[in-house]
Amino acid sequence: MANIMDLATEDKLEYHFFPVSSGSVQFKVRTPNDAHIALTMGPAESDPMVEIFLGGWGNTKSVIRRNRTKPDKVEIETPGILNGGEFRGFWVRWDGGIISAGREGEAIPFLSWADPEPFPIAFVGVCTGWGATGSWKIEDGAEFNTPDSLEYKFGPVVSGSLTFEYRGPHNCHVSLTQAPAEVDPMYEIMLGGWENTKSVIRHCRQKPDKVEVPTPGIMNPNEFRKFVIEWRSGRVLVRDGQSGEVIMEWVDPVPFNITHFGVRSAWGARGQWRISHFSGAQPLPPSAPVAAPLYAAPPGYPGAGAPIVAGIGNWVDATSGQVPPGAVVGGQDCNGEPLYVARAQHEGAVIPGKLCSSHGCAFVAWGGMEHGKNEYQVLVGGPNNWVRTNGSNVPPGAFPGGESEDGEPLYIGRVNHEGSLTTGKVQQSHGVCYISFGGQELGFPEYEVLMP
């Protein structure tokens, strides 16, 4: 087992969310009743959502519910399935719309339902309630095996990277696809092929290979070797997971949207794998200039023509849409209006967000909603150096923007969404950048973070 996340949940039916990149999650829970698991697209309770209730109704039955709506999709009697004095192990899996739950050590699920409208699951939430608190041990990157078979095991991707460890003599194969199946278009990365002598990148299962490099001894049957695969805009990189060194690289002139990955071992090899959520390696360099020159304030807007001065920057008080001279432009709204880096107080927190001058206020994200603030602070004379990253990988020295109600530092991030480049808050413990948009708080595992 690897990367066990310990978590305590209160008796308040409030989900704690974390990202997932494989098609399953394994966990142990200690609670007398009502262990709830949510499967969602984002790190919050929002539709579409599938919930699995274990040991509900006084630890007598378990159900699957969709979009918080009754009647439940599946209901079975499970008396005594949970225990407040000991950990009980379970797994939840999803693939092609089939949601299933089972006990640790049992391959056959005791709950299963086929969702007629499946959606990409990127986050899992856990909570307890109805008189119960809980202790959880959630497995991140648990080990699994692949047989000597040219058959991929598929799971959904969360972001533009996949980190994994492989232990086997040779032929570690990874595919990137737009469905949980071997369908074209498709990339294949074959590491340690040809009796552990070379590695290749293959497109649509066709030869000649797009890239071929000698990699003698890259795999080892006695120890795990770590690798990172990254992709964006058709550019595929394979890195050594320890050194970050690029092993192979290829640019597809006709890229496609990657939604799934597959793994297998073959040609006389069996493999053992550990799949992680997000890459800790260096992010891909930007494919276009950063936003400082692209989104400078146009003539006629307050602050236009004022130089963006290097330095640590100052937070300047403002109200009612005012933009102080030298305000840092962080992005632009859907209509092309510049968005400035701002922050405001809300519910005991100081939250980085965006200032949209024409709206007469700044906006911050909190509690699943967008909040307009007439009084706020604007970053003036500060940096405009944005670095791409993902998950909880906030670069050391990132520019601080505020803190949560619990005292956790919040950093300044931004994401592209529906034609806008919107600034918001990066909460490292959540592994996402939150922005306010269209009245909602939206979380994104891939983002840019402001650096000095």
Image (spheres, rainbow, N blue to C red):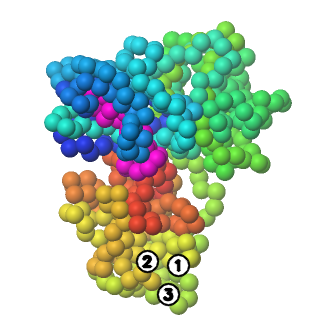
Q: Element at badge 3? A: loop
Instruction: Mark 3 and mark 1 in contact? Answer it, CB < 8 Å.
Output: yes
Instruction: Mark 2 and mark 1 in contact? Answer it, CB < 8 Å.
Output: yes
Q: Element at badge 1? A: loop
Q: Element at badge 2? A: strand
Q: Which quadrant does the N terminus fall into? A: top left
First in residue order: circle 2 vs circle 1:
1
**Is residue 51 rendered magenta in the image?**
yes
| Point 36% across, 31% down: residue | 63
> Mark 2 = which residue?
356
| Point 56% across, 63% down: residue | 418
- Segment colored magenta: 35-55
> Mark 1 = which residue?
337
Q: Indicate which label's residue lies in the foreground, 2 or 3.
A: 2
Q: Which quadrant does the C terminus fall into? A: bottom left
On the image, the x and y values in percent for residue 352 come to 35, 65
* Above or below 170: residue 126: below
Q: Indicate which label's residue lies in the foreground, 3 or 1.
A: 1
First in residue order: circle 2 vs circle 3:
3
